Image (cartoon, grey):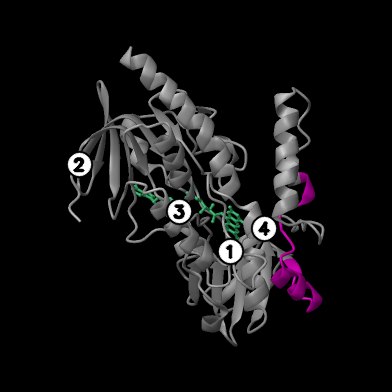
Amino acid sequence: EVVVPEARDVVVIGGGQAGLAAGYFLRRAKLDFVILDDQPEPGGAWRHHWDSLRLFSPAEHSPLPGWWMPRQPGEEFPTADYVVSYLADYERRYQLPVQRPVRVNGVHDAGAWLAVDTDRGTWRARVVISATGTWSEPHLPSCPGSEVFAGRQSHTESYRCPKEFADQHVVIVGGGNSAAQILAEVSAVADTTWVTARPPRFMPDDVDGRVLFDVATQREAARRAGLPDDGGVRQLGDIVMAPSVLEARQRGALRAEPMFDRLTERGIAWDDGRALDCDAIIWCTGFRPALRHLAPLGLRTENGIVPTEATRSVQEPRLHLLGYGDWTGWASATLVGAARTAKPAVADIAQRLAQAAG
Ligand code: FAD
């Protein structure tokens, strides 16, 4: 397919779940738009997760707008592959104009337009929606001794399955869901040491994605009503007791050590004199918003994020940010949250474009 850069009312950058949710509402608003995605196939981050990853909630609790995810035969919690096929079907069903692979290198202020520079030419846009997610920006904390460690260091981003660590001693770093789930399966085939900066906080056993969404919804309602913030899902803990994590707990594999202070040639060491040899370290230390393409706009950032009013950039009102995390709207890095934040974002864009057209 020949990609021809053109002028559009709206250019969406990123064709993952957040970009598709935006596409659904842009189509309904009859706006002229394109979605640019740098991947060869549909699915966004779901194509890059490890083999055993599943949604935290049953399919019917994870809808994109318009067409809910059908149940996966034989599975209560859909697999990542199934989510990929749902996203691919969703694109087709709504004939969303996704161009891929197109890599956006930079968004520039070009007067009346925003210029979207890509490896396939420059698109012009009245409004840009950035929905580039986080998976392409793995976060690796710096650690003394990192260069002397002779074993293998990797990040969640490249982890696929436990097989490659069989019979090794593996250190897993991080106190979130990725660390707990990877620990759960690696500990079944290897010796593991789990290391966390703070003691891990487990959610109650009966909390899954459904409860998290309910709590997040209540929190949002309270916020709108001007009531004090009770911390939302954070008060429940960080780690969902997914079936694999529960099973690892039964095996006694969920004991965590405090964060080590440095790497040595053969492993990790604490300042109190303790040391441990290991073959591999998996850093499950999270991701950051993928915002490099916005650098030419010279936007002020706070802690690596762009200040927004709802999803609209405070400094550049022609730019909306979708997905990424709670800072761009309620649970916006989830399927159901992507839909809820895309709707008002597109309503705002449609209104401003209509005003500008006079
Ligand atoms: P992405 O899916 O990352 O899509 C962004 C797209 O933009 C990608 O295709 C990317 O390659 C592309 N892109 C990036 N930069 C550029 C550029 N410069 N030019 C062009 N294209 C670009 N979510 C749920 O909804 N439910 C769950 O139960 C759930 N469970 C999870 C469990 C775990 C352990 C983890 C790690 C995640 C889970 N998630 C869950 C979250 C989910 O995987 C991601 O947060 C989600 O895919 C983010 O969607 P997105 O559309 O914002 O970004």
The residue carrying mark 3 is: 90
Q: Residue at x 51, y 43 (%)?
A: 323
Q: Of marks 3 and 1, which one's residue comes earlier in the chain?
A: 3
The residue carrying mark 1 is: 262
Look at label 3 and name its amino acid. Tyr
| Few, some or many residues within 10 Å of mark 2 (<14, 14–19, 20+) | some
Viewer-nearest of labels 2 and 3?
Answer: 3
Look at label 4 and name its amino acid. Ser
Instruction: Indicate the quadrant containing the C terminus: top left, top right, bottom left or bottom right.
Output: top left
Tell me residue 296's x, y (percent): 30, 34
In the image, 89 versus 240, the foreground residue is 89
Disc 2 versus disc 3: distance between alpha carbons? 24 Å
Q: Residue at x 67, y 78 (%)?
A: 187
Disc 3 versus disc 1: distance between alpha carbons? 47 Å
Look at label 2 and name its amino acid. Pro
Q: Residue at x 65, y 57 (%)?
A: 176
In the image, 66 versus 160, the foreground residue is 66
